[in-house]
């Protein structure tokens, strides 16, 4: 068996075994393409505060007092934007966001819970096939293995599609769709063309997915850049954030006093001139409060910095701009945004979405080609097992047919 044929059979086997899971991850990936933009569009009526000429924002304690008294619980995150017309965003989990006017303290309303719940469900299917909490570990192992297999398919696909004899006709057959084809030739042409044009973005999507799925891949990313991998944190419950992992299952976040928030926010605003958003996630660490300061639109890690202040005195405890990270950590920070295409802005999201739709078509065409190959092999097997007819018997049957027809 030649090396090319060996690669082909491994390619075919992985495609057949992981095809259904890759198809699910591809379809859900397309649905998540413009998640941030779609969510903002559904909340458009609530994303406008009412600043007046010469008006200033209320102290943060006053801004949060109304929603705090209404919910009676500590929010999980608070985001304030530099845009004077933007309201403060107070989050309770991923599916519940309230918008508060920073000039009056009034609650403008709750963001679209339906669209957030929809994207949360799609993301759960994308990451662990919609499995319940107790089964997410096993489901994530399956999606991680299928993502690794998909990376192999993406790498070996162009190798298999390279024409054995270089000619314009052979190159055109894998670069452009051909009309007038049907059956196996049509599916093969589509598989080749889509695979060639989508190979580069799919390679980045699959590679970043592997880095996020496996600790060994994450550590390898650090080691190839000459850095020591960070110590592994305590094992997370499936789907839990690092902060949630510090609390026992079922234990709610401790209540947090709002006193002193204004001084902390003022200090955070002064840290980075030209900031676009400030986000505080709660509960804060004991004696320290950490802000995420973003100079962009939320889609680029190199625009983000971490500021940790003393919760009592608002003095600087730790300042971590993106440039202060080593090469391994910087690359790891990019992984998630390369995976979603957000690293390239709206154009990057569009390219990633189109490539992911192409992946779904690759899986479908691959399954059709495998089925046609199996059917052709079966027919050949049946034909070989059929007994050969004697010449005189065939002549006699032909004579009967001719007599009957006449």
Image (tube, rainbow, N blue to C red):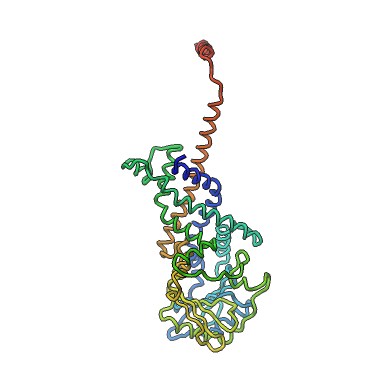
Q: Is residue 206 left or right of residue 287?
A: left
Rendered location of residue 7, percent (x, y): 47, 45
Image position of 79 with respect to 26: above or below: below
Q: Give the camera-side residue of 368 and 147.
A: 147
Image position of 276 with respect to 200: above or below: below
Rendered location of residue 114, percent (x, y): 57, 64
Image position of 65 with respect to 358: above or below: below
Instruction: Determine the residue positioned at 31% across, 41% down.
Output: 167
Instruction: Tell which residue pokes out farthest to the left in this image.
Output: 168
Q: How many marks?
A: 0
Q: Is residue 123 visible?
A: yes
Q: Is residue 405 visible?
A: no
Q: Give the camera-side residue of 292 and 208.
A: 208
Q: Give the camera-side residue of 197 and 228.
A: 228
Rendered location of residue 232, percent (x, y): 57, 69
Rendered location of residue 388, percent (x, y): 53, 20
Instruction: Tell which residue pokes out farthest to the bottom in this image.
Output: 313
């Amino acid at each position: 068996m030649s090396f090319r044929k060996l690669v082909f059979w491994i390619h075919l086997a992985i495609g057949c075994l992981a095809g259904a899971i890759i198809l699910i991850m591809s379809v859900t990936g397309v649905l998540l393409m413009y998640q941030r933009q779609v969510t903002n569009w559904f909340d458009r009526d609530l994303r406008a505060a009412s600043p007046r000429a010469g008006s200033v924002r209320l102290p943060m304690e006053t801004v949060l007092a109304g929603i705090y008294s209404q919910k009676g619980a500590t929010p999980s995150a608070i985001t304030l934007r530099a845009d004077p017309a933007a309201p403060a965003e107070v989050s309770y989990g991923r599916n519940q966001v309230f918008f508060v006017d920073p000039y009056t303290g009034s609650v403008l309303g709750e963001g679209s819970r339906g669209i957030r719940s929809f994207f949360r469900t799609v993301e759960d299917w994308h990451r662990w096939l919609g499995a319940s909490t107790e089964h997410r570990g096993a489901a994530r192992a399956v999606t991680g293995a299928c993502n690794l297999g998909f990376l192999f398919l993406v790498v070996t696909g162009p190798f298999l599609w390279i024409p054995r004899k270089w000619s314009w006709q052979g190159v055109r057959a894998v670069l452009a769709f051909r009309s007038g084809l049907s059956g196996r030739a049509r599916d093969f042409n589509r598989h080749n063309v889509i695979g060639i044009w989508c190979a580069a973005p799919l390679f980045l999507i699959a590679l970043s997915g592997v880095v996020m799925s496996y600790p060994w891949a994450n550590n390898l990313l650090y080691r190839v850049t000459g850095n020591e991998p960070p110590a592994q944190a305590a094992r997370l419950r499936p789907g839990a954030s690092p902060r949630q992992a510090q609390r026992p299952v079922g234990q709610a976040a401790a209540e947090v006093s709002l006193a002193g928030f204004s001084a902390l926010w003022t200090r955070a605003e002064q840290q980075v001139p030209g900031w676009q958003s400030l986000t505080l996630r709660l509960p804060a660490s004991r004696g320290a409060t950490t802000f995420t300061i973003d100079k962009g639109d939320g889609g680029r890690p190199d625009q983000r910095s971490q500021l940790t202040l003393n919760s009592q005195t608002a003095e600087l405890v730790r300042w971590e701009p993106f440039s202060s990270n080593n090469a391994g950590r910087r690359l790891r920070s990019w992984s998630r945004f390369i995976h979603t295409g957000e690293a390239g802005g709206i154009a990057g999201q569009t390219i990633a979405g189109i490539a992911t739709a192409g992946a779904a078509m690759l899986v479908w065409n691959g399954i059709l080609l495998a089925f046609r190959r199996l059917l052709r092999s079966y027919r050949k097997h049946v034909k070989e097992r059929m007994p050969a007819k004697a010449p005189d018997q065939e002549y006699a049957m032909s004579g009967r047919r001719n007599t009957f027809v006449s």
